[in-house]
Amino acid sequence: MRKLFLLSIVLLCCNVLTAQEFNATVSINHSQIGNSNRQVFKTLETALKDFINNTKWTSKNFGNNEKIDCNFFLNVTAYDNNVISGTLQVQSSRIIYNSTYTSPLLNFNDKDISFTYTEFENLNYNPNSFDSNLMGLVGYYVNIILGLDADSFSKNGGTSYFQNASGIVSMAQQSGYKGWAQGDGSNNRYFLVNDIMSSSNDSFREAMFIYHFDGLDKMTDQAKKGKEGVITSIETLSKLYAVRPNAFLLRIFFDAKADEIVSIFSGGPDVNKQKTLETLNKISPLNSAKWSKL
């Protein structure tokens, strides 16, 4: 009996140590396309969720409490001959040290999605080839999420994942699908990973690290010190604004963080936030209504 008990503990530990990286949800809204075959979207929804959650994306071991929460919201605007078109909202969050709170890392709306999908087809991902736009999109966003998460725990910790995403962009540019090339418009997949990896935008990645590691991770035990870390991260972001006032990455940061920043400075120990308020209004004027609540 004791041997069976010990074996069960070993198996449980092995399961925890080899848990996959994601706790993903996938939602597909197909209300705009009338009464077409709606079952195909439920099938795709389930298949994508299972594929993302059950695939081993990295060589690292993630415990169950370390899994990355992420959401994929596909809004279908057209469906014809197995071609699905629409928009894709991608969100991810990161658990904060010594708490149950998760902080948003990414909230990005990809406005130009199309791919071919046949119900019940096998979903196979090969990082060394571009076999379908659906798998290319999944692989790309998985690596963007992994990169941002890793950057929030260690400075430039996500570089290898961003390199993976950049490699997918390079392969996808020959496919003819939109969103992968520089000429497909601004603020697309090409520019997202290209800007993250550009040395001229290093302050974005530095700010992401400071905001989480020196800011939010300190707030449970040292709330004031944590707030000061968030302030430092915002001042770090102002360096990016000084070089590129309309930087895409500034929007990426505040699309995820604006509401959280308001919450951080709306309670708890007082800190001198006047300069921070001025910086926020300067580098993110689109959120001025939110900053007025501080």
Image (cartoon, rainbow, N blue to C red):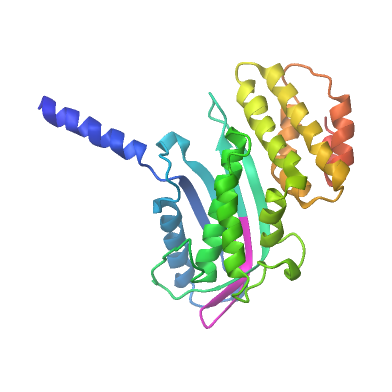
- Where residue 127 appears, x then y in whole percent? 48, 61
Q: Is residue 81 magenta?
A: yes
184 shown above or below 82: above
Magenta-colored span = 74-89
Res 242 → quadrant: top right
- Where residue 159 appears, x then y in whole percent? 59, 45
Res 7 → quadrant: top left
Q: Is residue 159 left or right of residue 18?
A: right
58 shown above or below 267: below
> Principal SS element in the magenta part?
strand
203 shown above or below 182: above
Residue shown at 83% from the left, 29% from the top: 294
Q: Is residue 116 magenta?
A: no
Q: Residue furthest front?
A: 199
Numbered circles on residues, count: 0
196 shown above or below 266: below
- Front in this rendered view, residue 263 or 24: 24
Residue shown at 30% from the left, 33% from the top: 13
Q: Is residue 35 visible?
A: no
Res 60 → quadrant: top left
- Where residue 201 appears, x then y in whole percent? 75, 45
Q: Is residue 3 left or right of residue 182?
A: left
- Front in this rendered view, residue 32 or 110: 110
Residue shown at 74% from the left, 33% from the top: 261
Q: Is residue 203 left or right of residue 105?
A: right
Instruction: Assign the N terminus to one quadrant of the image.
Output: top left
- Front in this rendered view, residue 100 or 157: 157
Q: Is residue 140 visible?
A: yes
Q: Residue furthest bottom?
A: 81
- Where residue 53 appears, x then y in whole percent? 43, 51
